[in-house]
Image: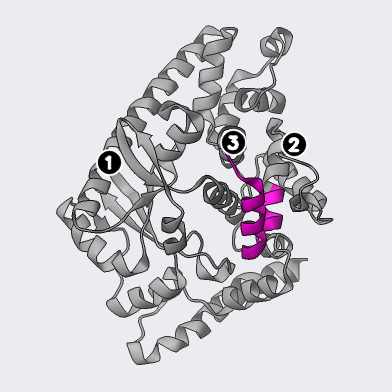
Amino acid sequence: MQFVLRACCGNANPSLETIASLNWTRVMEISEHHDVMPLVCARISELGNAPTPISLRARRECMRNAQKNIRLTYELLRLLECLESHGIRALPYKGPVLAQTVYGDLALRAFSDLDVLIVPEDLARAKAVLRELDYEPHVTISPAVERAYLASGYELAFDGALGRNLLELQWRLLPNFYSVEITVAQLFERSRFARLSGNEVRTLAPEDLLIALCLHAAKHAWARLSWICDIDRAVRVLTLDWAVLVRRARTLGVARIVAASILVAERMLGTLQPDASLPLFHDQALSEITSKVVATLTACEDCDVESLGYFGLMVQSRERIRDKARFLWRLAITPGISEWSTIQLPEFLSPLYRVVRLTRLAGKALPRFAER
């Protein structure tokens, strides 16, 4: 069954005998878990050998996803036009733009929200502009907390007419405690333009896009096949300057994350390595990381991002000692929305949120450590 899922998302072709013997209900369940239903349903329609009820469901799922994605695409274009008209530069990089750029079809990727990068200095103005379009922040926080969150966080979610958490304005690719020092200003400097439903929109340079996709997958412990599909398609479709990509990844200290992501895509989907001789792949830790991730994907396991196992994987995935140390230190002392919403402190006592953070982490980690 896992082979069939890989075949639907990658390059292999399952035999007719394999298709005939499948538990199709389970195939659809796994597809939904991994957020690859559009790819699987499109492949089922192509093969034409699934039972009639499954074929009908596949057509319905394809149509539903296509309709939703078209609505979100035009909502994104409306948002971008409004932000740009107020002098706020915006850079979408997942959602509709990714579907069109690397899948070549809006209907082949599942997404339910819109991710837009802005420079942090524009956040306050962007919030005011979005209110004109009836968008409101999903979580209400005080001005003091927002200033702190701007320094340590990376995104603010907004509710709109089409749904809750529909839009995420991001001023970093990852929260500050992940210790990946890349700014949105740098991403804007290297950005390109792409066509989206007849409109020209700004998006990430190919090398930055692949790095961003690998970072996003790693942040979630590579636990969904959909994120691996994004990486697979990016490697296969984008015109990448691998020398530039390797240099940029090594400068950021994320070469191991990029290499592990590509190797997982190779194991799961048959993605071809660009060049096995690249220094990117000369890392002894890659085999262990790749095996862990593939086992998790195959078992359809969810990842607890506050578990000791997750923190260990994040440390293992960084190649530089200083980045490992900064990740652990910042993780321990950087408060987030959970801490700020747990207790309301006056602004002059805001440094005490670090204590709240440490206490909360200790309360979660110690019982689990004792169980071990």
In front of the other: label 1 or label 3?
Answer: 1
Q: In this view, which residue lies farthest toward the bottom?
A: 348
**Which element type, helix, strand or loop, lies under badge 3?**
helix
Q: Are marks 1 and 3 in contact (CB under 8 Å)?
A: no
Task: Tell whether 78 sits left or right of 182.
Answer: left
Q: Position of residue 360 (x, y in %)?
A: 54, 75
Looking at the rendered structure, the kind of residue marked 3 is Cys
- Residue 120 image-quadrant placement: bottom left
Q: Position of residue 170 (x, y in %)?
A: 40, 59
Q: Quadrant of the C terminus?
A: bottom right
The magenta span reads 239-260
The residue drawn where x is 77% and y is 50% is 281
Looking at the image, tell me whether mark 2 or mark 3 is earlier in sequence order: 3
Other residues around mark 1 within 10 Å, as few (<14) / some (14–19) / many (≥20):
some
Looking at the image, tell me whether mark 2 or mark 1 is earlier in sequence order: 1
What mark, if any, has residue 267 been given in the picture?
A: 2
Q: Position of residue 185 (x, y in %)?
A: 42, 63
- Residue 274 image-quadrant placement: top right
The residue drawn where x is 58% and y is 56% is 219
Looking at the rendered structure, the kind of residue marked 2 is Arg
- Residue 9 vertical placement versus 79 (above, below): above
| Residue linked to disc 3 | 229
**Which element type, helix, strand or loop, lies under badge 2?**
helix
Magenta-colored segment: predominant secondary structure: helix
| Residue linked to disc 1 | 77
Q: Are marks 2 and 3 in contact (CB under 8 Å)?
A: no
Please tell me whether residue 249 belongs to the stretch shown in magenta.
yes
Task: Tell whether 208 sits left or right of 223.
Answer: left
- Residue 203 vertical placement versus 145 (above, below): above
Q: In this view, which residue lies farthest toward the right?
A: 284
Looking at the image, tell me whether mark 1 or mark 3 is earlier in sequence order: 1
